[in-house]
Amino acid sequence: MVAPKPRRQAAAALAMALSLPLGGCCSLARLLCGPDRSPWVSESYRTPEEAVATLCETARRDDPVTAFRALSPRYRSELGATGSFEFGVIWERLKRQVPGLHMLGYAVIESSLTLPDGRRRFLLETSGHRVELIVAQVASWTVIHGASGDPPQEEGRYLSGPDRLWERIDVGPGGELVVRIPWEPTTMGPVQPDQIRQVTLGLEWKVDQVRDPEATGGGGT
């Protein structure tokens, strides 16, 4: 049997790619080249728009580890994801359930609105598909600690709701801010005050739902 010539193989592959129902040059590049490897757009959850941009970036790079971090604790629980390691399987399933999610990195925002419960709804379009993202504000605390010369360790927890954040902040008798962190020696171990390197208590926006708007009846703007 005579092996096909390389030029003929390349032409056949290109013809097959061009015959597929793709939504533009980005779709073709994704098909031929796979996940994007260019420099990362900053991972950030300070605003609803930055949370959406972060998830779009994870889709562009097919990065389930960062996608897991971009989700709210409530949505992680709904999906059955207890950690970033096993989330890879869930991420692949979610991409099959929501057409266009794999192309979210090339999406444009068609509309956004604030829901009655304070969450934000974004409708995105990519390669002929629409994807609906709901983002919610979550509260959390983080403590980075470690003895001198030891690598730092990070511990943190999500609070049950944004309102719980302000319950942990008070003003002391001398006008100083007092922040109360639920210290748990069973998980964090004995830590001396001089071993604490950083304490963070704040609000972030995380993706609370990823949906196909056509399946949920929310395709309109």
Image (tube, rainbow, N blue to C red):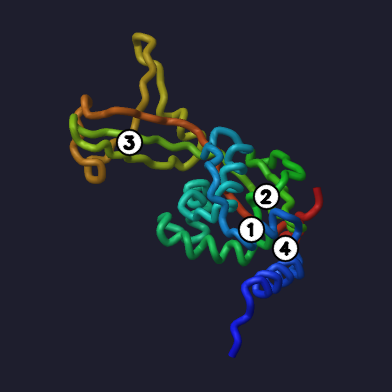
Amino acid tagged 2: Tyr
Check disc 3 and report its element: helix, strand or loop: loop
Q: Position of residue 18 (x, y in %)?
A: 75, 66
Determine the CA span between mark 3 and mark 2: 41 Å
Determine the CA span between mark 4 and mark 1: 25 Å
Q: Looking at this view, is 4 or 152 the one in front? A: 4
Residue sitting farthest toward the top? 174
For label 3, count other residues whose C-alpha is less than 10 Å away and answer few (under 14), some (14-19) or many (20+).
Answer: few
Total marks shown come to: 4
Residue 60 to residue 193: above or below: below
Determine the CA span between mark 1 and mark 2: 10 Å
Amino acid tagged 3: Pro
- The residue located at (74%, 58%) in the rendering is 129
User: For mark 2, what is the residue?
Assistant: 106
User: For mark 1, what is the residue?
Assistant: 30
- The residue located at (40%, 16%) in the rendering is 171
Q: Nearer the viewer, mark 4 or mark 2?
A: 2
Task: Kindly check if marks 1 and 2 are in contact, taking CB atoms under 8 A apart as contact.
Answer: yes
Determine the CA span between mark 4 and mark 2: 21 Å
Check disc 4 and report its element: helix, strand or loop: helix
Q: Nearer the viewer, mark 3 or mark 2?
A: 2
In the image, which disc is placed on residue 174?
Answer: none
Q: Position of residue 59 (x, y in %)?
A: 58, 53
